[in-house]
């Protein structure tokens, strides 16, 4: 096992560091920047289904559901197709309206999650076209779906999902861009720009990983609190949810993710000098609005950990700590803002002496209801 960890203390840390390679493996052979095309067999073969779809329904659980939420922003923004994101466990029992004009995308790292599998069977029985985004090759979900695209992240051993999440977002971004091109909802120059920026993400993830020592110091300061709040807007709202989930899963500290503006409708009541609040405040995407949310937190004495774009000045002045990530397109920013949140939860859990790779009560794959 020590050899498998490749010199890292835990599988989770190894998998966090594998992300530059995993993301590259995910787009290799699919993102052809020179030719300015995206090639994915599962999409090409079924393009008609996607183009004729009234809407896309995404079903998943846990971290994969968060990747689905990010995808909702990307698909609607770039490909202008309505998207609904559903917890598989709710969807399957709700007597949902599904027609032959629906495309259902199921996202699952393991490809074995019982609720997601059941949701797929239900959608198929109603005539929907079902597309899988799985990591494990030949898994039940990969076999049950009509077509799909693998994430190619390599084996993920740590129970808390890391590289599966970022590679799911990568695949879903490729699909959204491919559909946007086919539908003509993105200009050719914008499309090229996205390809270029996506190709640069692995290098930028590597850059983001360099904040490790700085994040460790922040972890040391806050490791003994009992509550954390995570805020983000737009594309980074799902990242806030995922950041909170990571902390809960492995450190057992209660954490809540919230859309930053929605804070006023509840969580703001919890803010005092003992509450650390992680705020994703990258330059593109509602920056000024997030800054004003940060001011509201500050006036209530909350401790602010800002995830900011390199070179930021405004948030730096207000926040107790900032963690920088390189600049990228707003639509790709979740691939970078996620990284410091993974490291923060990892270091807190290690400092608290928790079993990072196998947290209590959790399973890597939930194959029973
Ligand atoms: C479990 C795992 C999570 C995972 C979720 C969905 O809860 O602990 O890490 O996100 O299942 O799993 P899937 O394999 O379907 O992505």
Image: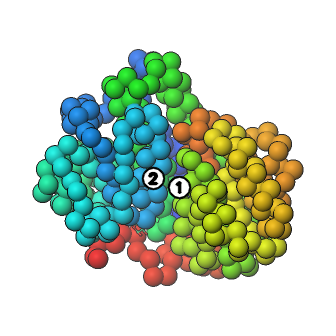
Per the image, label 1 sits on a secondary structure element best described as helix
Mark 2 surroundings within 10 Å by alpha-carbon count, few (fewer than 14), some (14 through 19), many (20 or more)? many
Query: Which image quarter has ligand 1?
Result: bottom left
Instruction: Report whether 266 appears left or right of 95.
Output: right
Q: Are marks 2 and 1 in contact (CB under 8 Å)?
A: yes
> From what the image shows, is residue 325 above or below residue 192?
below
Which residue is rendered at x = 63% and y = 70% of the image?
Answer: 266
Farthest front residue in view: 265
Instruction: Report whether 248 appears left or right of 113.
Output: right
Question: Which residue is identified by label 1?
Answer: 238
Which residue is rendered at x = 21% and y = 53% of the image?
Answer: 98
Instruction: Report whether 160 appears left or right of 38.
Output: right
Residue 58 position, x and y percent, is 34, 52
Name the residue nearer the viewer: 212 or 266: 266
Residue 137 position, x and y percent, is 28, 52
Name the residue nearer the viewer: 331 or 170: 331
Which residue is rendered at x = 64% and y = 56% of the image?
Answer: 261
Q: Work out how far the residue at label 2 is from the one at label 1, CA to CA, in angstroms.
A: 6 Å
Name the residue nearer the viewer: 102 or 169: 102
Name the residue nearer the viewer: 239 or 142: 239
Residue 97 position, x and y percent, is 22, 56
Where residue 265 sits, quadrant-wise, is: bottom right
Residue 87 position, x and y percent, is 36, 63
Residue 69 is marked as: 2
Q: How is the image coloured?
A: rainbow
Does the closest atom of ligand 1 sit within 8 Å of the Cβ of label 1? no
Where residue 109 sits, quadrant-wise, is: bottom left
Q: Of label 2 and label 1, which has the lower sequence position?
A: 2
Farthest right residue in view: 317
């Amino acid at each position: 096992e020590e050899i498998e960890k490749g010199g890292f203390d835990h599988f989770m840390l190894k998998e966090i560091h594998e992300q530059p390679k995993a993301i590259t493996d995910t787009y290799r052979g699919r993102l052809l920047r020179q030719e300015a095309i995206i090639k994915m067999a599962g999409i090409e073969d079924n393009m008609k289904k996607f183009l004729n779809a009234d809407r896309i329904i995404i079903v998943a659980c846990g971290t994969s559901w968060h990747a689905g939420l990010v995808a909702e922003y990307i698909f609607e923004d770039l490909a202008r197709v309505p998207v609904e994101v559903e917890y598989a466990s709710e969807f399957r029992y709700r007597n949902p309206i599904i027609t032959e004009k629906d495309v259902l995308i199921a996202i699952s790292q393991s490809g074995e999650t019982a609720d997601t599998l059941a949701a797929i069977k239900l959608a198929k029985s109603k005539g929907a076209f079902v597309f899988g985004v799985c990591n494990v090759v030949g898994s039940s979900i990969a076999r049950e779906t009509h077509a799909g695209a693998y994430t190619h992240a390599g084996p993920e051993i740590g129970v808390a999902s890391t590289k599966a999440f970022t590679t799911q977002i990568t695949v879903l971004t490729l699909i959204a861009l491919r559909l946007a091109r086919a539908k003509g909802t993105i200009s050719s120059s914008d499309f090229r720009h996205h390809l270029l920026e996506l190709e640069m993400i692995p290098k930028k993830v590597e850059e983001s990983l360099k904040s490790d020592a700085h994040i460790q110091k922040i972890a040391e300061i806050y490791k003994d609190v009992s509550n954390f709040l995570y805020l983000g807007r737009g594309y980074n709202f799902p990242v806030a949810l995922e950041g909170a989930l990571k902390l809960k899963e492995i450190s057992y500290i209660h954490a809540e993710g919230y859309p930053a503006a929605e804070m006023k409708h509840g969580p703001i009541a919890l803010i005092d000098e003992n509450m650390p609040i992680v705020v994703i405040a990258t330059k593109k995407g509602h920056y000024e609005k997030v800054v004003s949310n940060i001011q509201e937190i500050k006036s209530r004495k909350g401790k602010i950990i800002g995830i900011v774009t390199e070179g930021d000045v405004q948030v730096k002045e207000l926040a107790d700590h900032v963690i920088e990530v390189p600049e990228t397109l707003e639509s790709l920013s979740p691939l970078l803002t996620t990284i410091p949140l993974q490291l923060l939860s990892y270091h807190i859990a290690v400092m608290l002496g928790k079993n990072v790779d196998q947290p209590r009560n959790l399973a890597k794959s939930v194959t029973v209801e």
